[in-house]
Image: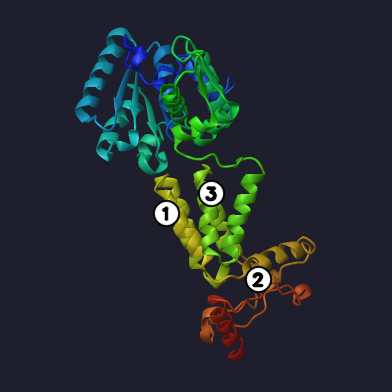
Amino acid sequence: MNLFDMNENTRQLPLASRMRPEKLDEIVGQLHIIGKDKLLYRAIKADRLGSIILYGPPGVGKTTIARVIANTTKSYFCKLNATNAGIKDLEKIIEEAKFNQNAYQKGTILFIDEIHRFNKTQQDYLLPFVEDGIVILIGATTENPYFEVNNALLSRCRIFELKPLEKDDLITLIDRTLKDQEKGLGKEKIIIDENAKSFLADQAGGDARSVLNALELAYLTTERNKKGIISITLEVAEQCIRKKAIRYDKNGDNHYDTISAFIESMKHTDPDATLYYLARMLIAGEDVKYIARRICVCASEDIGLANSQALVVATNAFLAVERIGMPESTTILAHAALYVCCSPKSSAVSNGIYQAMDETNKTTDVPIPAFLQDASYKNAYKLGRGVGLDNVHQFPNHYSGKKCMPDELDHHHYFNLSQMGSEKRIQAFLDYLKNNTK
């Protein structure tokens, strides 16, 4: 019996634990890494696995993949959880791995759950044994490994990012559980409403464990009717998740309508509406990184130089959301959205670059003035390259007033500042330079 095997009291385990796949082909979703033509699938099937790190949110299959490997490999399989393991645990496993390799010519696969919890010393200890092949490492983490795992260890592992499960994957999992008579609920008389099934899948946030926990709660808390049937309705599903069903399809009109309303509320400086539409998206389980990206875009497109700090706040919020996750990211997103909402607005940046790109498509054959061309090579001056280009720092105010646009395009103007926020100050500075040039 390996460390993933169920004990004799299997039926007492939570439904999510009982329904863990035993074989590779039983895993739901993650086809981008375990589809039949993918590297990880072929490596597991051939039992030729190298060291890997499985990265993704909870409930998407990291431990499940490790469990399948444990069931299929001919190597010894060991499991540690980094939250309660230390150097002594690693030393014991390494000694056993060396013995098994020398005595039986058998390798050892070491699965470390929550590997980001290991400190630098613990990670460094593993390094030479992974490099020499004493152990094949499988690390699982919910945190970005590029932030949390040593570069030296990362360089010896292939990283596979697992994605939140799709709605269809979760519905497949619900159906499979209701039919499975050995580990699931197939022996029970259960009828589930399609709306309830769809709601459970929507609200699970791509988490298989979450959807099965909700399904189990619905089963355990719903009374049988006179025919002995348990009927799981939308109302029952809502009570189990403790959320009301919100009309929101992440791939449909409601998704685009809500994000549009959110962006327009920030642009029109309506903080109450900004918070309302943000709340609708969060409750509906919208991807928080998607929301953060849209805040960043609004900060540049609709504020720009009127308050350049808005892009700094939005970008840092995006980074924080990536590293922290939910539910703590709720206030981070609200902070950034309100800052962007309450900032002075200007479209000078977006109008300028798009107008310049539109006209550039029509004028790509216009030569760059010779004095601006590269003069770093020998005898460039003989071709007139860089000739007449003065050092800007020798002029008063570090401003020469020299025109850099091609003569053919000298009448083109793309940069038009508003009088909002910092743009008023920028315009005053540019006017000062022009009026004080000798």
Number of numbered labels in the structure image: 3
Expressed as whole percent of the image width and height from the top left, the position of residue 61 reads 45, 26
Tell whether 34 sits left or right of 11: right
Between residues 189 and 162, which one lies in front from this camera angle? 189
Amino acid under label 3?
Arg
The residue shown at (44%, 49%) is 321
Q: Dot 2 lies on which element? A: helix
Q: Is residue 156 above or below residue 396?
A: above
Of pointers 2 and 3, the one earlier in the residue sequence: 3
Residue extending farthest to the front is 226
Neighbours of disc 3 within 10 Å: few (<14), some (14-19), many (20+) = some
Quadrant of image for the N terminus:
top left
Expressed as whole percent of the image width and height from the top left, the position of residue 154 reads 40, 36
Badge nearest the viewer, 2 or 1: 1
Q: Is residue 150 above or below residue 267?
A: above
Q: Are the residues tagged 2 and 3 within 8 Å (C-beta)?
A: no
Whether residue 172 is visible to the viewer of this picture, yes or no, is yes
Q: CA distance from mark 2 to mark 1?
A: 48 Å
Q: CA distance from mark 3 to mark 1?
A: 14 Å
Neighbours of disc 1 within 10 Å: few (<14), some (14-19), many (20+) = few
Badge nearest the viewer, 3 or 1: 3
Residue highlighted by disc 2: 372
Question: Label for residue 280?
Answer: 3
Question: Label for residue 331?
Answer: 1
Tell whether 305 sits left or right of 109: right
Badge nearest the viewer, 2 or 3: 3
Q: CA distance from mark 2 to mark 3?
A: 52 Å
Tell whether 423 sits left or right of 123: right
